[in-house]
Image: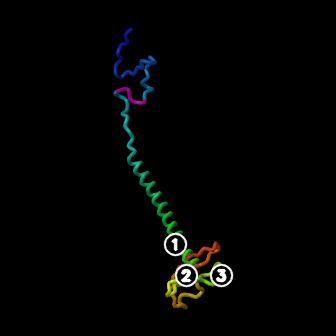
Amino acid sequence: MTEEKKPDNVVFNTKTKRYDASLKPYATSVGAPVISITDTTAWKNRSINKTNHKINAKYLELKAEYEKMISEFEYNRLIFSSEFSFEPVIGEVYHLYKRKEGNSFLSLIAPEQCNFKHIGSFYLNVDQTWEKVNEI
């Protein structure tokens, strides 16, 4: 028995011996709606820009925090390597000076009462770390 050829707009599955036009994921007749691919370029670009902005903002935040931590480390290293002959009290402000010979020392004497080169004023925190005091 020979199989007769079906017209192009009729979808006949020779394996199952059934008409299966309604099961196809694509249009099977001339009158079917046009299948068009959704353009996702604009959405992708918006998403990329939002993601890049978010990551860049987080990076700048982490960078600022890192720079602050490094400056705190440097201040603490500078103070702990300086000379002082007293035990600093938590909660007090101390002043760091540099002598003409180049060595630094910590003092209670305010900068306006001293002739040494003033490096900065520092506050001793509860956790035994030094925090730079913003001077007016």
* Label 1–label 3 contact, CB within 8 A: no
> Is tag 2's residue or tag 1's residue first in the polypeptide sequence?
1
Q: How far apart are marks 2 and 1 (CA)?
A: 14 Å
Q: Which portion, as a residue range, is magenta? A: 25-29
Above or below residue 11? Residue 81 is: below
Residue pointed to by mark 1: 71
> Which type of secondary structure does the marked residue at label 3 adopt?
loop
The residue mark sitting in front, 3 or 2, is 3
Percent position of residue 106, x then y: 58, 83
Amino acid on which the number 2 mark rests in the picture: Ser
* Label 3–label 2 contact, CB within 8 A: no
Amino acid on which the number 1 mark rests in the picture: Ser
Percent position of residue 85, x then y: 63, 84
Residue pointed to by mark 3: 87
Residue pointed to by mark 2: 121
Amino acid on which the number 3 mark rests in the picture: Glu
* Label 2–label 1 contact, CB within 8 A: no
Whether residue 74 can be seen here: yes
Asked if the magenta segment contains residue 19, the reply would be no
Residue at 64% from the left image edge and 84% from the top image edge: 86
